[in-house]
Amino acid sequence: MNSTQKPVAVITGGGTGIGRATSEKLAAAGCAVVIIYSRSDAEANDTVNAIRARGQDAIAIQTDVADDGQVRRTMAEVVDSFGNITYLINNAGITRQLPFADLEAVADDVWDDLFAVNVKGAFNCSRAAAPHLRAVPGSAIVNVGSIAGETGYGSSLPYAVSKAALHGMTKSLARALAPEIRVNCIAPGAVETRWWSGNEAKMRQLSGNLPLQRISTPEDIAETISLLLTSRSLTGQIIRAENGQTL
């Protein structure tokens, strides 16, 4: 076992986009970073190598967050490797780009797939990490939701509903895990990631007239996630990071 006293941050979907930016930011802040990924093997290992090249600690573990058994084994492996878990960032998420008003385009498998990862996956990770988080003062969970969960409008109807469910679960977990573990959620608006590759016009159309006249970067969102992890007076909050979209 590595007896490091560093904070240990577990980041699902940690190899790409917001997850990568968060992994790099927390590693730079002194955390040992554990990147959980499902399919992005090359990207996850590239992120680990980039972090290690700067003399910081990171490992990657392949895990299907929708599979409770895999999640429990992964959290046990994290504790075996680093001794504890301080922070959990539930960032893993999937979407389907569907015409929003076309209800017939929404098949059962779309609901099942999106809820399995976006909702059930976050719950599985939170449940498996909770006993370890409780043992570390100042521990916290941040769920990565979406402004779609607040507005009801996004890349697809099931996606927006899944993120609304995640926002609701944030409040329930904040109550269930208090006082030892704080649980908050960030609800980003449009963010320049690979999710919108080829659909940039739709991204801007969904965003509407932004008062700040900008689209967020993954680094913007990572900065707010870092603040939520360390803000001792915040729990059960849904923080909108959307450049004024919902004003």
Image (spheres, grey):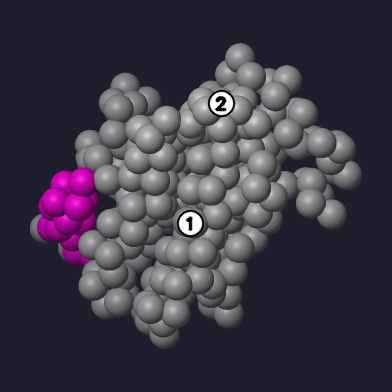
Report helix, strand or loop for mark 1.
Answer: helix
Residue 243 screen position, x and y as percent: 77, 46
Q: Is residue 196 above or below residue 152?
A: above
- Disc 2 from disc 1: Cα separation: 20 Å
Residue type at tag 1: Leu
Neighbor class of circle 2 (other Cα within 10 Å; few <14, some 14-19, many 20+) is some
Does residue 168 appear in the picture of this structure? yes
**Is 114 displayed left or right of 85 in the figure?**
right
Select label 2 or label 1 by which is in front: 2
Q: Quadrant of residue 56?
A: top left
Residue 100 placement: quadrant? top right
Q: Is residue 7 above or below residue 147?
A: below
Residue 240 place in picture, x, y as percent: 68, 55
Magenta segment boundaries in residue numbering: 67-85
Q: Is residue 58 visible?
A: no
Q: Main secondary structure of the magenta part?
A: helix
Q: Which mark is residue 98?
A: 2
